[in-house]
Image (cartoon, rainbow, N blue to C red):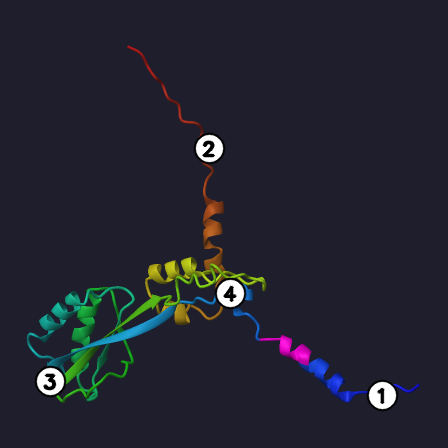
Amino acid sequence: MMTKFHPVLAIAMPLTLLAACGPADPRRGLETVHQPVVQRTDYTIDLQTAGDRLAPGESNRLGGWMEAMRVAYGDRISVDDPSRYAAGARDDVAAEAARYGLLLVDTPPVTTGQVQPGTVRVVLSRSSAAVPSCPDFSDVYKPNFNGAAGANFGCAHNSNLAAMIANPDDLVRGQPGSVSGSDPGTSTKAIGTYRRAAPTGAAGLKSESTGSN
């Protein structure tokens, strides 16, 4: 007796197997899906110039503006001077920024509106970091049959990191080193200091006398 072959059934079986393979759960890896998001806000102030310097009284106005903005480490200050002739005004702004321990950034960001002739624009760029998707308790009452991490996994760690970091831009591109590549001297400095330290008992034991009258 001959058996008839049904090609429709042979094709349907692989299609059924492929249909069961859905997209991989992103929470099954070791990396959390909750990552810090860095946002930047630019604040501007236009200052009058006299020649190539700031006009009289404008340095005081800039200093009051910086104090009101609570300029601190992590802020980026730049000068937008389309004329390219107010080099002295840039020096005046740099002097005010130095009071807060900051250096001027060479390239200012693009801002709204044109810089009028006879003025320079000081731009204060400030970044903030947060994890907007946290906390996430969406799966508290749901079964987990995929071996995936909980929905709230990583929220505490990355939220604390975003809150504590002094310069949020470091989460995006980090800080460049003093030399290209890794510096073995920097990585072994702490170990070398520990090894060169004298043992606590090298000078002998300290003698004490209670004495009596």
Q: Amino acid at mark 1?
A: Lys
Q: Amino acid at mark 3?
A: Gly
Q: Residues within 10 Å of mark 3 (few under 14, many from 20)?
A: few
Number of the front mark, 4 or 2: 4
Q: In what quadrant of the picture does the C terminus appear?
A: top left
Residue 18: numbered disc: none
Question: CA gap, disc 4 to disc 2?
Answer: 47 Å
Question: Where in the figure is residue 27, as x and y percent of width and height?
Answer: 52, 66
Which secondary structure dominates the residues rendered in magenta? helix
Q: Residues within 10 Å of mark 2 (few under 14, many from 20)?
A: few
Number of the front mark, 4 or 3: 4
Assess whether residue 21 is covered by the magenta stretch. Answer: yes
Number of the front mark, 2 or 1: 1
Question: CA gap, disc 2 to disc 1?
Answer: 93 Å
Question: Where in the figure is residue 5, as x and y percent of width and height?
Answer: 82, 87
Question: Where in the figure is residue 131, as x and y percent of width and height?
Answer: 38, 66
Question: Where in the figure is residue 151, as x and y percent of width and height?
Answer: 47, 63
Residue farthest to the left?
56
Residue 51: numbered disc: 3
Determine whether the residue tagged by mark 2 lies in a helix, strand or loop.
loop
Q: Residues within 10 Å of mark 4 (few under 14, many from 20)?
A: few
The foreground one among 99 and 195 is 99
Give the labeled residue for mark 4: 31
Determine whether the residue tagged by mark 3 lies in a helix, strand or loop.
loop
Question: CA gap, disc 4 to disc 3?
Answer: 56 Å
Question: CA gap, disc 2 to disc 3?
Answer: 68 Å
Residue depicted at x 66% and y 79% = 18
Q: Is residue 86 above or below residue 197?
A: below
Residue depicted at x 38% and y 61% = 159
The foreground one among 186 and 132 is 132
Give the labeled residue for mark 2: 201
